[in-house]
Image: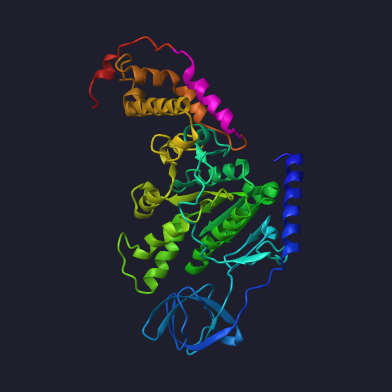
């Protein structure tokens, strides 16, 4: 962001903040006692209480040794027993402890004061910069938007990555999955999109990440300039499953509030898989039956509830373009969470280990990646170039082994011959340094230069005798 653009952005933010503070005064959510119960049982992650009638999703407080309190949420009930899941460590918990149900008008504090801050799943600042003054409170679960009132996706979004901008164009308000195994450059690609995407506000949800990675992302990936227009919700892997679940919900609720102010928001959630793992732990703890690979049914109900909250607002009121990372166990693209995510997202970008091991970054497998809104945001010549490049790559990869050992005979297939002639330029086009940004127009122009030039196929040659011999 240039100095002039940064000053303009700061001025616009300050004007919005002043207008809203002058119009209303935010009040914290009201707390009140509803009914007091007693803790009867604590097994694993689940607490069982009796005597406290509370609806699903409501909050309770459980007394521990020394008069301290632990927050918990109602996740189920059976007869007169209420099942609770804590949001913090249960050290000091005692039998027959008091359980107090609380009433809350809101769950998530929102406002311009969140920009540049790092908070946890409860909204508590982690950056040591003091409390955050909220402007309003919104529900953790959000408010569903009538699908018929949503603004359609008609405009492309610049994410600064040439392979994505040119071959997998992203629309403003699209929900995309970033499918990757471990160590193939997922975090690096997220960092590039964080720095280069054209968005008013960036909301980052780091769900179930290692604590070290949280600091690295904030200080190295975002940096001081990127953090100024960002909100980071961090829930490390050592937090209870309910806290990890709430971290994803809080990040989405904050993004929704900024969208409702008419802003264009980029939501990055790393990762959707760990959100599913957290719900699996909760579901199994309260007695849900495991179904597909140990995942209970509630996991597959929670995923679309989370993802559907992103997207364009009603009647053109802002947008949330969301990238959800999906960890593929053992690089298995058919594992349950990956398969379910593909069905509910508007596209998927696949990073493969084969490409990463070859030293190409970002390691995007263009052949198996899809943007489902490409038809709405591209013209016919652009789509034809995308299809042509995919055909060339598919033809080359189909003959990769023969080419590698010198057994492919030029002239056998004109498409493979063209792919061979263009292959060095194709690899150069797909690769991009992390310090380099390529906007939509530049990416599209690079694709046109790559494919539109006239290139004579290399003369046909015969494979050598030893290459034609069967492998021994």
In the picture, residue 235 is in which quadrant? bottom right
In the picture, residue 285 is in which quadrant? bottom left
Residue extending farthest top: 459
**Viewer-side residue, 292 vs 387:** 387
- Regarding residue 423, the answer to whether it shows in the image is yes
Q: Quadrant of the N terminus?
A: top right
Q: Left of 77 or right of it: where is 231?
A: right
Q: Give the magenta-colored segment's residue range.
A: 437-455
Q: Is residue 84 above or below residue 392?
A: below
386 is within the stretch colored magenta: no
- Residue 232 at x, y percent in the picture: 61, 56
- Regarding residue 360, the answer to whether it shows in the image is no
Q: Is residue 86 above or below residue 448?
A: below
Q: Residue at x 47, y 32 (%)?
A: 167
Secondary structure of the magenta portion, mostly? Answer: helix
Q: Residue at x 73, y 63 (%)?
A: 23
- Residue 197 at x, y percent in the picture: 60, 42
- Residue 296 at x, y percent in the picture: 34, 65
Q: How many marks?
A: 0
Q: Left of 448 or right of it: where is 436?
A: right
Q: Quadrant of the C terminus?
A: top left
Q: How is the image coloured?
A: rainbow
- Residue 451 at x, y percent in the picture: 47, 21
Q: Is residue 266 above or below residue 74?
A: above
**Viewer-side residue, 201 vs 19:** 19
Q: Left of 181 or right of it: where is 122?
A: right
449 is within the stretch colored magenta: yes
Q: Is residue 359 above or below residue 39?
A: above
């Amino acid at each position: 962001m240039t100095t002039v653009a940064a000053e303009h952005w700061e001025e616009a933010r300050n004007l919005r903040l002043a207008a809203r503070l002058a119009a209303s005064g935010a009040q914290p959510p009201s707390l009140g006692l509803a009914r007091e119960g007693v803790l009867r049982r604590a097994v694993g992650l689940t607490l069982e209480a009796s005597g406290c009638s509370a609806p699903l999703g409501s909050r309770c407080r459980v007394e521990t040794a020394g008069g301290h309190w632990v927050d918990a949420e109602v996740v189920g009930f059976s007869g007169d027993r209420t099942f609770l899941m804590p949001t913090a460590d249960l050290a000091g918990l005692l039998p027959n402890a008091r359980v107090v149900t609380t009433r809350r008008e809101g769950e998530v504090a929102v406002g311009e004061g969140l920009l540049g801050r790092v908070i946890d799943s409860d909204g508590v600042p982690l950056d040591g910069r003091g409390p955050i003054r909220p402007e309003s409170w919104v529900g953790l679960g959000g408010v569903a938007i009538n699908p018929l009132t949503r603004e359609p996706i008609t405009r492309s979004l610049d994410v600064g990555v040439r392979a994505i901008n040119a071959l997998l164009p992203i629309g403003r308000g699209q929900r995309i999955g970033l499918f990757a195994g471990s160590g193939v450059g997922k975090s690096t690609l997220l960092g590039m999109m964080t720095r280069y995407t054209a968005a008013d506000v960036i909301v980052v949800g780091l769900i179930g990440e290692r604590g070290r990675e949280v600091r690295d992302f904030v200080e190295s990936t975002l940096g001081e300039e990127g953090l100024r227009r960002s909100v980071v919700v961090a829930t490390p892997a050592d937090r209870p499953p309910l806290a990890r679940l709430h971290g994803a919900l809080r990040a989405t609720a904050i993004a929704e509030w900024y969208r409702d102010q008419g802003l264009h928001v980029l939501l990055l959630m790393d990762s959707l898989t760990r959100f599913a793992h957290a719900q699996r732990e909760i579901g199994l703890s309260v007695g849900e039956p495991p179904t597909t690979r140990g995942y209970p049914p509630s996991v597959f109900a929670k995923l679309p509830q989370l993802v559907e909250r992103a997207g364009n607002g009603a009647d053109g009121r802002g947008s949330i373009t969301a990238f959800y990372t999906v960890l593929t166990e053992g690089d298995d693209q058919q594992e349950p969470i990956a398969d379910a995510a593909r069905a509910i997202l508007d596209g998927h970008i696949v990073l493969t280990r084969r490409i990463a091991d070859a030293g190409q970054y970002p390691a995007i497998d263009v052949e198996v990646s899809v943007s489902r809104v490409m038809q709405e945001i591209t013209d016919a010549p652009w789509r034809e170039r995308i299809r042509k490049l995919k055909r060339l790559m598919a033809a080359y990869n189909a003959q990769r082994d023969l080419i590698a050992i010198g057994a492919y005979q030029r002239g056998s297939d004109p498409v493979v011959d063209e792919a061979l002639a263009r292959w060095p330029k194709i690899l150069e086009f797909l690769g991009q340094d992390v310090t380099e940004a390529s906007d939509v127009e530049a990416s599209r122009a690079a694709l046109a230069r790559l494919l539109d030039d006239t290139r004579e196929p290399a003369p046909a040659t015969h494979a050598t005798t030893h290459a034609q011999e069967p492998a021994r």
